[in-house]
Image (cartoon, coloured by chain):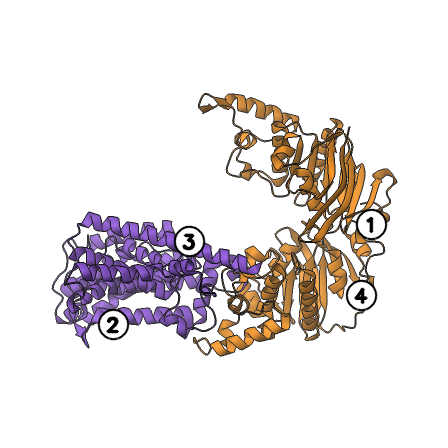
Amino acid sequence: MPDAAPTTTTRAPAPDSAPASEDGRDIVGLALRFALLIGLVALVVFFSIRSDLFLTSGNLKNIALSSAVLLIIAVPLALLVIMGVVDLSVGSVVGLTGVVTGLLIVDHSVPWALAALLGIAVGTIAGFLNGLLVSYSRLSPIIVTLGSLQFYRGLTQSLRDNPPAGFGHGMELLGRGLLVGVPVSVWIATTVFAIGAFVLYGTPWGRYVYALGVNQEAAFLSGIATRKLPTIIFAATGAAAGLGGVLFAARLDAAPPGTLGVGLELDVLTAVLLGGVAFSGGRGTMFGVLLGVVFLGVLRNGMTLLNVSDHTQAMATGAALVIGAGLDELSQRSQILRSIVKRR
Amino acid sequence: MTLQISGIIKSYGGFRVLRGVDMTVEPGEVHALLGPNGAGKSTLIKCVAGAVHPEAGAIHIDGNAVGELSPSRAFELGIAVIHQHLSLIDALSVTDNLFLGHELRRGPLVNQSAQRRIARDLLDQFGIDVPLDARVGDRPIGTKQLLEIAKAWHHTDVKVLVLDEPTASLSEGETQRLFDEVARMKQQGTRIIYTTHRLGEVFRIADRVTVLRDGNVALDERVETLDPDRLVAAISGGGGTTGRARTATAGEVILDVEELAGPRFGPISLQARRGEILGLYGVLGSGRTSLMETLAGRFEPTAGQVQLNGTKVALANPQRALRAGIALVPSDRQRQALWASRSAADNVLLPSFSLLATGVLRRPSLERAAFQTTADQLDLQPPEAERAGGAFSGGNQQKLILGRWLACIDRLSVLLLDEPTQGVDVGARQKIYHVCRELAERGVAVVFASIDTDEIVSLADRAVVVDEGRPIAELAGKDITEKALLSHAHQFTGGIG
């Protein structure tokens, strides 16, 4: 849905949806297209008025911190969804990699940087296995990754009963340190986002991602690696979840096997879909994903500041997703309608 | 007491598809409705079935004007149309399919025993040998077709049965089975309208023939007095168009197909030469599409081999075929080729993006230039790179797909086109033919398959007639005429097929 963005200016040949209204009269269509952006601005204004704490640098840092890991995982997951598949196991992969990294440091005295890299490697392998199963078995990605969600969580809990904790100075820097006044994890998320945008807009693979999502048979007949490409992006999603697991463990300075990353897959998927990526594949933008993640982060942070209860927060998040997706659907229809009218 | 169609006129968007068609089908008559693609057969059937309203003309059953028809009204009157794409639900049982939407009830429940009793009677009546609880999807297409007929029979008092290309995907055994059933229904006084591309069948089961050409009745005659040559002449339009003046001098063999076999075709041997346009002609179900798609790596061949420029190539998947230099413009544009929501540039350049990139980095300026060149070459209308593929007309969509291979033609030595101008307007058709000839002159071996004799005559330097997945005749140069193609395809050369 949101399309005009920093990223759009750098990619030249193909827009991801028809240009906005040409005559300027179609304000409704325009408003629908930028509904999420408008909603985000409205939220920021609302929370700033209701809470003095909202627009403080400390709170903005909180929002950035909580959004960072979400964004890191949302970027490759969005590529998967655009391609027409999905990975539901990312929460469990976060748990697995966080615990692996933690116990390597605590139980085996592995240096923190090496432990973190090994954790990311474990995540990559976990994602790669998902990809192999989905691409070469013809099983639904929902079935495969729902299965691995359970499997990886069980595996995590079998590794250690009580959480490894106390990872030392290096991990503390990673989890809570600042670089030029900005949290390290936010720098990492920015890098991941830039890589994602580059892949989607700057390389041929980005075109293949859309082509696969829109018409897989056509992609296959056009010589695109319809099995290899999804497998690689699944592996990248696992790597991103691994990175997320390391960052979570670093921030908590502990890695509880039973709770680390539980339910995260739903948050990430909510952000991705809220950002206008179509669950049926073929449509979505990186800027939209960024907006979806930030919207979710602002919504939750603001409600927490206003002392809104957890269950009300859940209801609001759910409602935001459905309303967001509904407006997006309306926007799509109005665009299709317009293109038909133009053809006549 | 007949079905009488008189003076039917129908236009689509100013183009007159039916120009006053008369047709009479008497009780107990099998009436074959024939004609080339685009002659108006489908539209006439739709008028009879109530799916389309004619602008003028009338339909009478047993002397009564039927008035304005809707599909449900037509069905109530006893007009049942069995389409090529059947309406049965594969996942349901035979009984459930026969009663779908009209279940017999006992209170809130389905009356299973009554349904089974009636279903049994129906199956016996139509001689269908299948268990009542069998899943329809597991049964062969011939059985499904008979079930569909039986279903229509159960739901209405069928007076007129329209069979649209019923034998296109049937085996010879299944065809005979269907014909037996047609003969039985005929005995009961049903009026049967029957369309087919296999002319031999006309002489097997039809009593009377109507040939449509360009929306007019070109022939209406009883089969006893009908001469196969005159039938072919009526369908092809008099003497038929003859081939263009062929100046192309074919070079060395590029594509050498030896005893290749695959799904529903083969073994088949073919050669395509540098600079030549080879046309494969065959009726529906002749195996053309399977052959083309196998050559493009869509299916793995079960036997035989393919040589490209003297080297044996493995066509394990389209990626390998492309790397070897074979590309395909598939027959089903929407399903197999178009990215409707993606831009024209994406649709054209997708296989070229990696060639135009420097390392992994795309080069927008090179991409724009490549798109522009291709769009100019094909006269794409409108020539907008950002326009969504689905927003183009059928002809221009086909240009996008042909352009996909034009943009990377230097890497290709064989271009396969399956039904290259299906659903394409006249202007785009000429442009596509023109580009095919240019490609041939540049040394690409162009191989296309078509169901349309006119297309084979206009485009092919050499034509191979394919039936039941095997080559049965070869024509070259001036010998390629609509009449010759039809005669060979229906094996009229040695008497009636």
Q: Is residue B466 left or right of residue B416?
A: right
Type of amino acid under label 3: Leu
Q: Is residue A60 left or right of residue B296?
A: left
- Residue occupying the point 67% across, 70% down: B435
Viewer-proximal residue among B186 and B237: B237
Type of amino acid under label 2: Trp
Residue density around tag 2, few if under 14, some if 14–19, many if 20 or more, within 10 Å: some
Type of amino acid under label 1: Ala
Residue density around tag 1, few if under 14, some if 14–19, many if 20 or more, within 10 Å: many
Q: Which residue is under mark 3?
A: A330
Disc 3 from disc 2: Cα separation = 35 Å
Image position, residue A237 (x, y; %): 33, 62
- Residue occupying the point 59% across, 68% down: B403
Q: Which residue is under mark 1?
A: B234
Residue density around tag 3, few if under 14, some if 14–19, many if 20 or more, within 10 Å: some
Looking at the rendered structure, the secondary structure element under dot 4 is helix
Callouts 4 and 1 on one subunit: yes
Considering only order in the chain, which callout, 2 or 3, is on the residue closer to the N terminus? 2
Which chain is painted in orange?
Answer: B
Residues at discs 3 and 1 in contact (Cβ within 8 Å): no
